[in-house]
Image (cartoon, grey):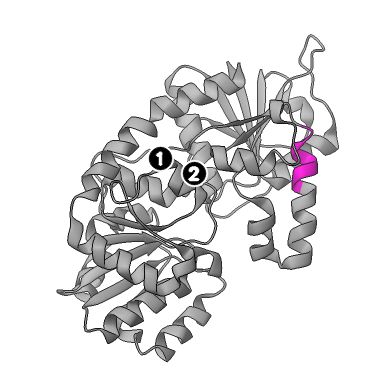
Amino acid sequence: MRIAFIINHLGLTGVNNVVCDLVTVLAGHGHSCTVFWLKDCECPIRFACETQKLTSKQQLSEYDIIHAHGLGPMAWLVRHGKVTNSAGERIPLVTTLHCYCFQDFTDLYGRLKGFLLGVLYIALARRFDKVVCLSKSMMSYYSRWIPRHRLTFVYNTRILPSVLPPLEEGVRERVLAFKGNSTLVGMNGALIYRKGVDLMLGAIAELSHEGKDFRLMLAGDGKERQTFERMAKEKGIADRVLFLGMVKDAWRLLPLYDVFALPSRSEGFPLALLEAGAVGIETVVSDLPIVKECFVNHHDVEMFKLTDGADGLKRALLYASASGKEKENIKKTFNSKYSLEKFYEAYLKVYY
């Protein structure tokens, strides 16, 4: 099978990580893939296939499936009209929806622009033959606007090396020096309100006030970093929070954490959670629909109710740091439910 993937650019994003993993597993089973991109970027990631800049729909005419990821690629295909092969037959169009559009776009762009982009996102998705969601919960969300017979779901996976490569020089030493004898909680991802960084700062402050020796490391950057830095100072925990900044392949940091945390208010299918499962680490997560659908509380992960806020997160951190058993369970669950083969088989059903 020949599959053309269309993405916005070749840079490092969660969406592109998913496409990268999908291309790798498809190529490994003998399928021919090409990744087409719309915009230039300075630091492209590597895909296990050819990449081309997309300028004409004629570039797509030799493929069996066209698979778009993201608002820009969906809009490009709809704007350019149907794509046909050499026999004049229309090539089927597939898109994967990676977010809950109204929630996530509002967070990124504000209420009005986010709403309008959400409406556009759904209108574009309705033009595709198959619309892939990341979970049953997400499929139910979009079934209000997209015909049910076009919808399906495929859980993400993550491809990590069996032996994690070393961190850049000085990073490991810096983290271990910061950690000392404390319980280190780590978060990998964008520093934005939706990721629940404020809840984590509140939980660390409560633990500190109770005399519990916890420290927080944030691997990532984002538009609200300065807000969170100021918040840490106001709560009196600036010395207990390390803003590490962007780290390439941040999953390499996971073995240094005592607890990995994902206190998000919204997620499609968090790749960072899958990375924690692949490595095997004690994990605390908010009770999002996707988490409750895919992992078991007090078995794979420790969940807290978002409605309980920082206090609920604090209690979950205390439980997870004292447990020591869930890191083995989350790894077993990842291997059994979210493996490469499961991912491949699910997408093969979509394409056929």
N-terminal of the pair, mark 1 or mark 2, is 2
Residue 190, position in %: x, y?
Answer: 49, 63
Taking the spot 73% from the left edge, 41% from the top edge, the residue there is 144
Circle 1 packing at 10 Å, graded few (<14), some (14-19), many (20+), is many
Is 204 above or below relative to 270?
A: below
Circle 2 packing at 10 Å, graded few (<14), some (14-19), many (20+), is many
Q: Residue furthest left?
A: 181
Residue 49, position in %: x, y?
Answer: 51, 30
Residue 122 is a magenta residue: yes
State which quadrant residue 123 falls in: top right
Classified by dominant secondary structure, the portion drawn in magenta counts as: helix
167 to the left or right of 29 = left
Q: Is residue 48 visible?
A: no
**Count of picture labels:** 2
Q: Which residue is mark 2?
A: 17
State which quadrant residue 149 falls in: top right
Taking the spot 26% from the left edge, 55% from the top edge, the residue there is 282
Residue 140, position in %: x, y?
Answer: 63, 40
Q: Secondary structure at mark 1?
A: loop
What are the residue bounds of the magenta stretch?
121-127
Q: Nearer the viewer, mark 1 or mark 2?
A: 1
In contact (CB < 8 Å): disc 1 and disc 2: yes
Taking the spot 30% from the left edge, 53% from the top edge, the residue there is 252
189 to the left or right of 163 = right
Q: Which residue is mark 1?
A: 158
State which quadrant residue 233 falls in: bottom left
Residue 220, position in %: x, y?
Answer: 44, 65
Residue 114 is a magenta residue: no
Taking the spot 78% from the left edge, 40% from the top edge, the residue there is 124
Q: The residue under label 1 is which amino acid type?
A: Arg
